[in-house]
Image (cartoon, rainbow, N blue to C red):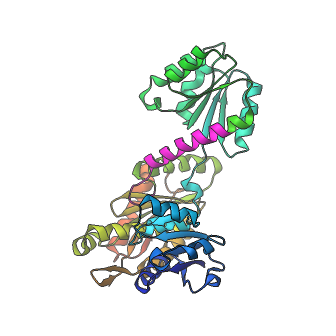
Amino acid sequence: MRSVVVLDKPEGFDQTSLLLGGLGFNVVPLLDTGSAKGCRVALINPDCDPELEICASLSKICKVLLTTNKRDFSFKIQAVHQGAQGLLSRPLNAVEVFASLEETRKSDMPEARVLIVDDDELTAAVYAMALEECSVRVAVITNPLLAEKAIAEFRPDLVIMDIDMPQASGLDVARAIRLDPQFTSLPILFLSSVSRKEVQEEAREIGGDDFIRKPVDIGYLVKMVRMRAARAVELRQIMARDGLTGLSNHVSFKEALTTELNRSARAQSEFTVALLDLDRFKSINDTYGHQVGDTVIQTFATLLKSSLRNVDVIGRYGGEEFAVILLNANTEQAEATMDRIRQEFERIEFLASDQVFHVTFSCGLAGSKDERGGEALLALADTALYEAKAGGRNCIRTYLPGCGSEF
């Protein structure tokens, strides 16, 4: 079990134990530096360590996060000087804490996509090889007249554009790309053997993010591409994420579903779609308020992220409804996974107005072999979810085609 060491006042320690314990973490009180042995993260309340001396000591052996609402700049300077790597607001938020405790999920940080447009096939191949060694996904075209089609299909985060090409100037290609509103902010990095200042200025006037002279220093090119592509990926992720939970939003989830349907058809593999809905969630909002309801949603999202694999796709489908794509899993395997999560979630204790309460969810499953269309597959899972709700809630139902009864 993953362990977290905590230095806090008794009430704060109990709240942290309640929050993290329900997410599968072993919470250990900090008695001395030996208590942190084997722990990857330490949570320290600066009220219990005013000079941050304990923070400095623990920072040598694990990641230290300070649980405080202090945000003045002088405090931040002191914190980083003493080895702190993050600040968590109080009261602790499940999503914020989990994001700090866990290594970034691979599915949450997709690889950058770079399109190289260069008529010199050999040179382009060298660039591509160098970038691919740094986990960048690369596509290459040697005919700039195919740039628009390649961008539409590959959806790059950055374009490396040679300026000097016989079919069309890279500058004109960039201008043509910018005519489409959806590509006006697409980063373009220009390459050219021409060193004239007016050419460089023209490149920047049409939205070029950088200008690199040929012959290109491969190390420098890789550094610039990774830096600029990372920013583009981050922006893409922000646009695709639900603000409350950090999960994929409705649109990006459905896009991922289409991608997986195409992939599974090619690979002749299968996956299962799950639709999950928090039971009687309206009564939680009505009884305890929407802020508590948000906490329940965030905690559930965090449990899903901690319980599922990196390759699985998790989305907030809308309101209190969530959706999951369990890759390379049939409905029987998916049902076992979801039932384990169901049992874990119903054990989590929520506290509001000095009252402890529990929340459950219902789930409907449908396998990709049952239906090849994304909307139809979601409809089958939704039908199964309806049956779970009708069957008493807090249960899992699977769509079973070809039977006298569908469930």
Q: Is residue 130 left or right of residue 43?
A: right
Query: Magenta segment, principal secondary structure?
Result: helix
Residue ID at (60%, 71%): 56
Q: 163 or 309, which lies in front?
A: 163
- Please give left or right for residue 213 compared with residue 17 in the image: right
Image quarter in which the C terminus is found = bottom left
Residue 15 is left or right of residue 154, and the answer is left
- Whether 1 is drawn above or below 176: the answer is below
From what the image shows, is residue 234 above or below residue 213? below
Percent coordinates x, y for residue 121 in the rendering: 74, 25
Q: Nearer the viewer, residue 72 or 15?
A: 72
Tell me, yes or no, whether the highlighted magenta stretch contains residue 30: no
| Residue 400 in view | no
Q: Which quadrant of the view contains residue 286?
A: bottom left
Residue 109 is situated, as x and y percent measured from the top left of the image, at 56, 52
Which range of residues does the magenta coloring cover?
223-247
Image point 57% across, 59% down: which residue?
105
Residue 230: within the magenta? yes
Residue 39 visible, this orientation? yes
Residue at 63% over, 71% down: 62
